[in-house]
Structures are given as C-alpha cells and as structure tokens.
C-alpha cells in the first residue's frame, strides 16, 4: 500500500525535477562551456564577456531603479487600498474586489501597449489632447522612460500586492491597536510602533514578490523601455539572443545565471516571510466588529482616487485598444475620428495568415497545456498534501521553484535543452516549457483543494476495499472538481497570453498571440495590434467568467 | 477613582438597520471596588466599557472619571483613550506578536517616556506580581493562553492606573484554567487599591469576583447591587433567571402580612418574603433548586408542597430531579443517599425567606 504512494512520489520528483531543474542545469552548463552546444569544454569566457560589457553597468542601474521603484510604488498603493477597504467607511467596497481581480484578465503586454498609445511622445492620444488644449510646444509626458515603466509595472503588480496585504490587514486583531491607544500612544505612534511592524512580514512579502515579478517582467521593458533605449536586464538579454547579427546564447546564459540566482533567493525569502506573517495571526476577536474609521470629509476625495485608479487599470486599457482598432491611424478622439471609424483592421487581422496561425497555436497551447498541466498538478498536489515524506517535501520545493523563474532566462535554458532534441522549434517545445514554468499556478489551487478533502474520506474508501487508483477516481477526483476547474482555467489564461518564454522559444511556424502582438508593436501597426489584443482579452475574460460560473455551480451543490 | 455615567446612549447603523447598543444609561461606579457589567451577549456591556475607555464615542450623555469629564456631548468634550490614563485587559489579550514579554509590558511606560531604569524596575516588579518572572525575553507568540492573560494583566497594571477595565478576560481560557485564573485575579485585585470595571456574560464569574454587579439587558441597566442582593433578592424575573438556575411559578398576591406576602400559585398558597405589592397583582414566584429539600412520602402543613419525582439525572454530587407538583414541574437537587426513584411521592417545605417574588 505504502510503496505505491512512495513510488508515485519518487516518479513525480523525477518528472517535476526534469521539468524545473533541467533548464536550470542546461543554463548553467551552457554558461560555462565553449561553443553553441551545452557540452563544450569548460570556459569562463562567456562570463568575462558578459560582465565586462560596458553596457551592463547602465543596464544594472536601470534595472535596480525600475525594479525597486515599481515594487515600492505597488506596495505603497496596495497598502493604501487595503487600509481603505478593511478599516474605513469608504463607499462602494465592491470596487476593491474588482480592482484586485479584473486587471489580471488584461495581459501585461496589452496593458503596456495601451499606455504607449496614450502617452507616447510623438502621437500619444492623451499627449495630443493635452498639447492642443494647453497649446504646448512638446508632449507633456513621455511614457518611453524609466518613470513611465515604473508607473505601468507598479500598476501591473498592484493586484498581487493587494491580495497579499489585504487579508493580513483583515485578519489583524484591531484590539492590538486599541490597546496601544489605551496604554497612552497616539494614533500616529500606534501606526508606527504597532500596526506597521505587525504587518511587516506581509508588506515585505508583497514587496519581494513585486521585485521578483518586475525583475522577470518583459512586457513593460520591451514595449515602453526599448523605444526610449532604456534597457533593463530582461531586454538586455532579449537583445543578445533575438536582435543583432550574432545571437549570443552563451553570454545571455552567463547574465541569466545572476538573474535566476537573485530571483530564486528572493522567492525563498518571500516564502519565509509568508510563514512569518502566518505566525503573527492572533486570535480573532469573537463577536465584536470594530467600528470603521469614519473618513468624514476625506471620504469623497479618497473614493475619487480609488475610482480613478479602477478606471485607469480596467476601463482605460480596454477602451483605448477598442478605439484604436476602429480608427484608421492613431489620432485623438474627435468628430472626424469617429466618422472615419471602420472594421478595416479587424478584417485585415482575420485574413492575416500569421495572426490566424498564432491564434490557433495559442488556443492549442492553452487547451492542451492546461489539460496536461492540471493532470500533473493533480498528482503533485496529492503527493504534497497527502503523502508526508522527505520526497514529498522535495517535491513541494521543486514545484514551487519555477515560481521564481524569469521567463526569458529559463527560456534560454530550455533553448539549450531543446536544441539537443527533435523537439526544437516545434510547438511541443513551447508546451513543455509552459507547463514547467507555470506549474505552481496549477499545483497551488490543487494543493489547497486536497487540504480540504479529509483523509478519513479516502481511508474509508480503502477500508471498503477500493484500490488507490479507484479511490482517486471515485472519491477524491469528484470532490476536487472545483479545484481542478479553477486550476485549469488559471493555467489556460496564463498560456493564452504567454510572452516571456515564447519570446525565446517561438520560431517561424510556432508563433503565438503575444509574439504576433509584439511584432505588430515593433512595426507600429497599432490598429491590427489592438484588434488582435481585444481577441486575446476576450478569450481570457471568457475563461475567467466561465471559471466563476462553474465555481458557483459546484459550490451550490455542496452542503451548506 | 469613581466613574460617573449620565444619560449615555449609543446607536449603530448596520445594513440599513439601526441597533440600539446603549439606551440612556446612568451609572455610578464607586472607587476601589470590583464592578461587574453582566448580561447576555449583545446587551451593550462591552459597548459601555469601550465608551468609558474612549474607544467608542456615545451619541449622547456624559462620562467622568475621578471628577474629570472625559466625554460630554453637550460640552463637546472627548478625551482620546491615550489621555485617559486607564489600564485595560482585552478579550483577546491583544498581546503584540512582534514584541517580547518585556516590551509588551514596558510599552505603557515607554510611550510615557519614563527613564530606562524606572521602566526596568517597574516591569520586573509587575511581572513578579503576576508570577511571570523570568519570562522577560520570551516572544509573545510563544505563550500559553494563561500566560498571555497574565502578560495582559501586567501591561494593564504597570503604569499604575487608578482604573482598570476588563473585557471578558477569561472567556478564551478552558474551564479549569478559567477557575484558577479567576481566583488569582480576585487575589490580585483585592491586593491593589484600584477601581476595576469587569465585563462578562458568565454569572458564576460575576458572583465570585464582584463587589457590585450591574445586570444589563438590551442596552439598559436593569439592576445594580451586591452579588448576594442580585442572587437572592432580585427585583425582576429576568435578573433572577439570568443569575442562576431558578424555578419560576406564576402567582397572584392574596394577602399582605407584617413580614410575609402570601400568594396563590400552582403550588397552593405560599407565604413569601414580603414585597410591597397590591393584592391581586400578578407576580412570579422564584425558588432556587438548592432551597428545595425533598423528603419521602406526603405531608401537610403551611408552605408544604407535595409531588412525585418525574425524572432524575445523576450528575455526581447529586441527582438533578424534576418534581411534578400539580401542573408545575420543579427542578431540585436530591442527595444521592436519599435512594428515591422516579414515581416516588415526595414533599418539601419552602422557607418564606427563600421564596422570592419578582416582577413578571
């Protein structure tokens, strides 16, 4: 009996290890060996070349400013929003739920593009409007700058930061603050000495995750940084492997090793912080709801800020893409613009063989990838939660590892690996890469679903004489359906929009939606880009709406 | 220090409904005694405590502590909690998880900017008082429920406030520990010259700890008095029923005598402790189970009730029995030695001073 479980766990360790450790190993091998394959003679040349590159210093400085700036901004905004929602009487609180979930349906690439359309210095729509309105010589804003990149990246990381900080703040026992007041501390002193220190693990966790995400971010630096020649590590790597005459995977691997090491370290710091934050959860007060802070006259202005943020993060990007997809070329909204509107870009895109190929590839990757990914996550989740052994501990760490993988770096590792196999330049390379990199997105919902299936339910099936496999099929899987559905949809939604890994692994014939959109951006074909982008948003929104619907259906069946 | 509360009301608006938490409360809490606010959950006792400490602002009325007005709607006085100089033990203890025991206890002195040596001395003294010496460096998250409770008490005492407030401080402890801690707390408080306001819904806790009990219901103070007065001599059926197990029998006043009030009831004519009530008034006769001493067989005489044992449950130190007397079913405790069975005829004599008449 036990051996079946143990064998399963070891098999999974092997499989997940292959998926996650393999690209890392190939990256390391590639960075140290001569020539274009991973198995040349040992050399440090690639490191020397990569780290003596005079451009690297500027790139590093830019990266530090970009990463820290956007993480700090995202964390501060999240803290502000979480405080308003959990502790004050701000109106229309449903907006906060919307604000923390809806932006995830808008792919980062399209969000960045919409800001470029609004605020680029030559013909950004908002810039044009402001210039005409205020009779300015030049455009008032330039989104193709470090400041612009920081702003957009911070808005993209805001929902995640909010989802980390808000629950910590909601489970915070208000008596901890009240007691500080009673014992003689002013509200300000209470904030500094009690509230913020107790929330520190959650705040730091949000910040560290922001750092990991912005370090790996490729959409923002490529759309908003490259036109203004503001390179960060992600785009620096991209230039090495995708642009210019001599692509240099070895140098990229050498630089990538540092990025990967930083990212993996940070993700373990993040994990420790979340554990710390849970330790601080105090006994919740029973039966007593603390009064909310009355904002008084600040209520409406603060609400306006939240409403504006929601508008900027949800309505504006979609509206700007829709508008751009209908007007013949980029122009500020006017009567003339509306009279010129037509479906030209839409018909162009729907007749463009490359766009259709990308759409087909992305749909295939989403459906096949999510199905295989969830199947793997199902077994991994089972082993992590239900089999308590050394091997399952290793499995957990392994399956968490790829959470820290910067797509473009790990893409280089996969590159080295796939070159050795017939999978190179096929859609299967993308499929395997996707599943490996996004495995945590499937494992996490599955693991929490397994936690909810009490082991007695499983044991009674075994006592009744069913085998492990029958128990899994007849008892466990049916109980897990809601978890399976949400994991599938989460993975499919990630795969539909996948950019950073695809940038490295995609070859002619295996283009995906995000790659095609990036190509349109490079060529300045904003109308076509917008039409294709709206299709992408529509697919991922449909998936999320479906998930909510299916989730609600299953919850209705469960006993209250 | 004494606390004076006049005309305090508080309403909440939740989900479109208005809930009255406090309704025109007047209360005087004398200095240096343990004063308990007792009532079922939702009666407003915690709200009243929070109004005293300043964590909540009433809608009307006045509160003064030791002669200083800390809240007045009419004169727009609102002293913030940090300026009221009180101590408080919270229901969840509110031990700050990021600080160790020493820093938790030292906090009230630190924010008052006391010198370091003074802080060290006072914290050590207070921790010794609550028998937690040697725990200074222990992280707050590594304390048991009882230890947390004592840290909370030490923190409330360290700045030597004149008034200390307790919000159901024992409700998070298990039954055995609760009893021990209650005794300890009583000992601590009687050693200090301090006014303690104590909120609880546990009647035994209230009876065991208090000098004075105020029973609350639906935002109002129903009765105030010593534990003995509240238990033996309540004015209302609600208080009599809430403070302990009671047999409540409908009755009507038949006659008033010098020291007795005689009523007609389902148990027959019963002479009770005198209450000033008009003849013919409907009242409730309240008899505590511990005052019903049953004997085998039937008997006659004044205030003697005959009945049969209807059911018996063995609970260790006694049988909890229900006795059928006419249409009434009375709860009584029967000695395990009595060897009575269900169906046996029994009788008992009620002492008039144990027959309490309360307003229906």
Image (spheres, grey):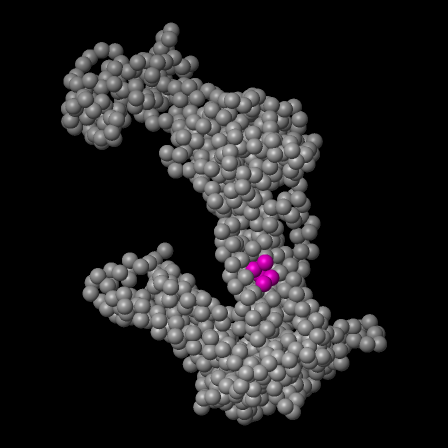
Tell me how many marks there are. 0
At horizontal 52% and vertical 91% (from top left) the residue drawn is A509
At horizontal 22% and vertical 67% (from top left) the residue drawn is A466
Q: Is residue B121 above or below residue A257?
A: above
Instruction: Find the magenta span and give its range.
Output: A204-208
Name, please, the residue furthest toward the top. Answer: B258
For residue B161, say whether it is visible.
yes
Relative depth, front residue between A402 and A60: A60
Main secondary structure of the magenta stretch: helix
Q: Looking at the picture, how far across and down is residue A250, in whole percent?
A: 58, 84
> Is residue A421 covered in magenta?
no
Relative depth, front residue between B311 and B74: B311
At horizontal 55% and vertical 30% (from top left) the residue drawn is B126
Quadrant for the N terminus of chain A in the image: bottom left
At horizontal 57% and vertical 75% (from top left) the residue drawn is A257
Residue A38 located left or right of residue B280: right
Quadrant for the C terminus of chain A in the image: bottom left
Q: Looking at the picture, how far across and down is residue A459, in whole percent?
A: 26, 60
Q: Looking at the picture, how far across and down is residue B146, in whole percent?
A: 45, 37
> In the picture, residue B207 is in which quadrant?
top left
Relative depth, front residue between B132 and A194: B132
For residue A357, say whether it is visible.
no
> In the picture, residue B271 is in which quadrant?
top left
> In the picture, residue A248 is in which quadrant?
bottom right
Q: Looking at the picture, how far across and down is residue A371, in whole percent?
A: 40, 77
Relative depth, front residue between B21 and A64: A64
Q: Is residue A311 above or below residue A125?
A: above
């Amino acid at each position: 009996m036990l051996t079946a479980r143990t064998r399963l766990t070891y098999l999974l360790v092997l499989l997940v290890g292959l998926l996650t450790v393999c690209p890392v190993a190939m990256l390391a091998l590639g960075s140290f060996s001569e020539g274009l394959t991973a198995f040349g003679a040992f050399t440090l040349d690639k490191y020397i070349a990569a780290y003596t590159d005079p451009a690297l210093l500027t790139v590093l400085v830019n990266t530090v400013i970009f990463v820290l700036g956007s993480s700090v901004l995202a964390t501060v905004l999240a803290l502000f929003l979480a405080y308003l929602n959990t502790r004050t009487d701000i109106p229309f609180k449903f907006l906060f739920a919307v604000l923390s979930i809806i932006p995830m349906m808008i792919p980062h690439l399209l969000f960045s593009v919409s800001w470029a359309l609004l605020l680029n210095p030559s013909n950004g729509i908002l810039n044009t409007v402001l210039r005409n309105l205020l009779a300015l010589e030049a455009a008032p804003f330039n989104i193709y700058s470090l400041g612009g990149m920081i702003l957009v990246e911070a808005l993209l990381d805001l929902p995640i930061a909010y989802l980390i900080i808000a629950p910590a703040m909601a489970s915070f026992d208000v008596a901890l603050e009240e007691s500080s007041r009673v014992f003689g501390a002013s509200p300000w002193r209470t904030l500094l000495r009690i509230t913020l220190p107790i929330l520190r693990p959650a705040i730091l966790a949000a910040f560290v995750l922001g750092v990991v995400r912005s370090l790996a971010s490729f959409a923002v630096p490529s759309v908003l940084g490259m036109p203004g020649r503001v390179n960060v590590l992600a785009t620096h790597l991209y230039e090495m492997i995708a642009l210019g005459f001599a692509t240099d995977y070895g140098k990229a691997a050498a630089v990538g090793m540092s990025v990967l090491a930083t990212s993996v370290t940070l993700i373990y710091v993040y994990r420790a912080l979340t554990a710390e934050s849970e330790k601080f959860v105090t006994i919740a007060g029973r039966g007593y709801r603390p009064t909310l802070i009355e904002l008084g006259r600040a209520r409406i202005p603060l609400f306006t800020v939240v409403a504006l943020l929601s508008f900027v993060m949800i309505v504006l990007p979609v509206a700007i893409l829709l508008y751009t997809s209908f007007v013949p070329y980029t122009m500020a909204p006017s009567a003339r613009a509306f009279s010129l509107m037509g479906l030209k870009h839409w018909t162009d895109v729907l007749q463009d063989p490359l766009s259709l190929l990308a759409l087909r590839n992305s749909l295939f990757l989403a459906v096949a990838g999510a199905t295989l990914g969830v199947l793997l996550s199902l077994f991994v989740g089972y082993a992590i939660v239900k089999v308590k052994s050394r091997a399952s501990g290793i499995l957990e760490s392994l399956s968490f590892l790829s959470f820290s993988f910067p797509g473009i770096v790990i893409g280089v590792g996969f590159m080295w690996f796939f070159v050795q196999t017939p999978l190179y330049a096929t859609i299967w390379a993308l499929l395997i890469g996707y599943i490996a990199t996004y495995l945590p997105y499937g494992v996490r919902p599955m693991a929490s679903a397994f936690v909810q299936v009490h082991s007695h339910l499983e044991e009674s099936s075994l006592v009744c004489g069913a085998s492990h496999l029958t128990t899994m099929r007849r008892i466990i899987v049916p109980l897990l359906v809601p978890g399976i559905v949400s994991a599938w949809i989460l993975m499919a939604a990630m795969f539909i929009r996948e950019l950073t890994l695809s940038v490295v692994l995609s070859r002619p014939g295996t283009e995906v939606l995000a790659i095609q959109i990036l190509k349109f951006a490079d060529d300045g074909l904003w109308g076509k880009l917008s039409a294709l982008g709206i299709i992408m948003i529509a697919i991922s929104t449909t998936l999320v709406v479906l998930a909510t619907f299916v989730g609600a259906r299953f919850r209705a069946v469960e006993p209250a | 220090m004494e606390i004076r509360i006049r005309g305090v009301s508080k309403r909440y608006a939740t989900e479109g409904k208005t809930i009255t938490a406090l309704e025109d409360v007047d209360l005087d809490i004398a200095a240096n005694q343990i004063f308990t606010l007792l009532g079922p959950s939702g009666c407003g006792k915690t709200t009243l405590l929070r109004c005293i400490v300043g964590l909540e602002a009433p809608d009307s009325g006045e509160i003064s502590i030791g002669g200083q007005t800390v809240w007045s709607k009419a004169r727009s006085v609102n002293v913030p909690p940090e300026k009221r100089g009180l101590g408080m033990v919270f229901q969840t203890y509110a031990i700050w998880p990021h600080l160790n025991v020493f820093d938790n206890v030292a906090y009230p002195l630190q924010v008052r900017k006391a010198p370091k040596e003074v802080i060290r001395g006072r914290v050590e003294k207070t921790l010794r008082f609550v028998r937690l010496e040697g725990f200074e460096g222990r992280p707050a998250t590594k304390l048991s429920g009882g230890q947390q409770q004592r840290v909370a008490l030490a923190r409330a005492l360290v700045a030597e406030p004149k008034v200390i407030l307790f919000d159901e401080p024992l409700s998070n402890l298990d039954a055995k520990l609760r009893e021990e801690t209650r005794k300890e707390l009583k000992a601590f408080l009687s050693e200090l010259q301090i006014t303690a306001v104590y909120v609880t819904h546990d009647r035994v806790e209230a009876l065991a700890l208090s000098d004075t009990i105020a029973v609350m219901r639906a935002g109002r103070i129903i009765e105030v008095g010593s534990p003995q007065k509240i238990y033996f001599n309540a004015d209302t059926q609600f208080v009599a029923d809430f403070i302990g197990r009671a047999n409540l029998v409908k009755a009507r006043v038949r006659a008033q005598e010098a020291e007795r009030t005689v009523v007609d009831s389902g148990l027959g004519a019963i002479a009770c402790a005198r209450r000033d009530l008009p003849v013919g008034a409907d009242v409730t006769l309240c008899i505590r189970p511990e005052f019903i001493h049953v004997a085998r067989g039937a008997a006659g005489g004044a205030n003697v009730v005959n009945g049969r044992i209807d059911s018996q449950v063995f609970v260790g130190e006694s049988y909890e029995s229900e006795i059928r007397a006419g249409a009434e079913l009375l709860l009584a405790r029967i000695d395990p030695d009595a060897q009575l069975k269900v169906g046996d005829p029994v009788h008992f004599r009620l002492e008039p001073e144990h027959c309490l008449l309360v307003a229906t």
